[in-house]
Amino acid sequence: MLALDRGLGYSGCMRIVRDHQFVRPENRGASVAIGNFDGVHLGHAHCINLARGHEAPLGVLTFEPHPREFFNPDAPPFRLMNAEARANRLEKMGVDILCELPFNRALASLEAEDFIRDIVVKGLDLRHLVVGSDFCFGKGRKGTTEMLRAFGARYGFDVTVVDLLNAGDVAVSSTAIRDALSAGDRAKPTDILATGTAAKRPRDRRKTQRAHFGNIRPPAAFIST
């Protein structure tokens, strides 16, 4: 069950926050993985696992629409999951709070420190941030992981930067999944998509492939659950 933060005191389900200016106390202070999450693959699952614990609720901070869709709305579909499928997958992985912030002109215009101060600190009061080594933030993607660590020291939150994850000889990324689908390979994406939890693997590969990719014509537009 998914619940929006509307002041109704939900419990026992993942809560979705879409306004960083009006956040209930129980939805503040999370330890989060941050990213665009156009799909949920094993690299994302690894970041989420690193965000677990830290004496804080487990969260994911992402954006809707995807920034690429905002800046180039006429581009061909590229997302591996729509927002609903992503939320369902994250809930199955045990995420407590999904911060799904609207990506709009105001957010896109925030300088790097303004994003940290206004959203990460004042708005959400995040305690721990887990990001990939290629993470950028703020207007013009000027914010770097080095800047993020410096802001963490200044504002009082911890930062973990994660290197790119490999599954065997395959780099785990949304781009790798899209490239495989475009080449007609549906086995490789199944191997690197996170299914429910990072540690749980389906027994029947053929059923898994049909469930994830049965309605996709490469290049992939969406994966639905």
Image (cartoon, helix red, strand yellow):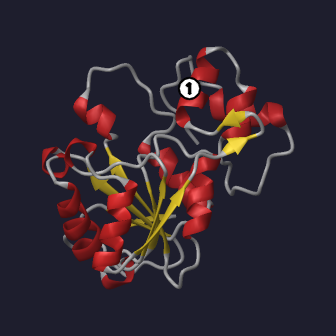
- Circle 1 SS class: helix
Of residues 2 and 163, the one nearer the viewer is 163
Image position of 61 (left or right of 182): left
Q: Residue furthest right?
A: 203
Amino acid residing under circle 1: Arg
In the rendered structure, the answer to whether residue 33 lies left or right of residue 194 reads left
**Residue 172 position within the rendered picture, expressed as x and y whole percent measured from the top left:** 63, 39
Specify the quadrant that holds the C terminus: top right
- Please provide percent x and percent y for residue 105: 14, 44
Determine whether, in the image, residue 40 is placed left or right of residue 142: right
Q: Is 181 drawn above or below residue 55 in the view shown?
A: above
Q: Image point 30% across, 73% down: which residue?
A: 124
The answer to whether residue 23 is visible is no
Where does label 1 land, which residue? Answer: 178
Residue 25: x, y in percent? 32, 84
Q: Residue furthest top?
A: 183
Sort mark 1 into few (<14), some (14-19) or many (20+) by Cα contacts within 10 Å. many
Instruction: Say which residue appears at 75% left-offset and 37% top-offset.
Output: 208
128 on left or right of 52: left
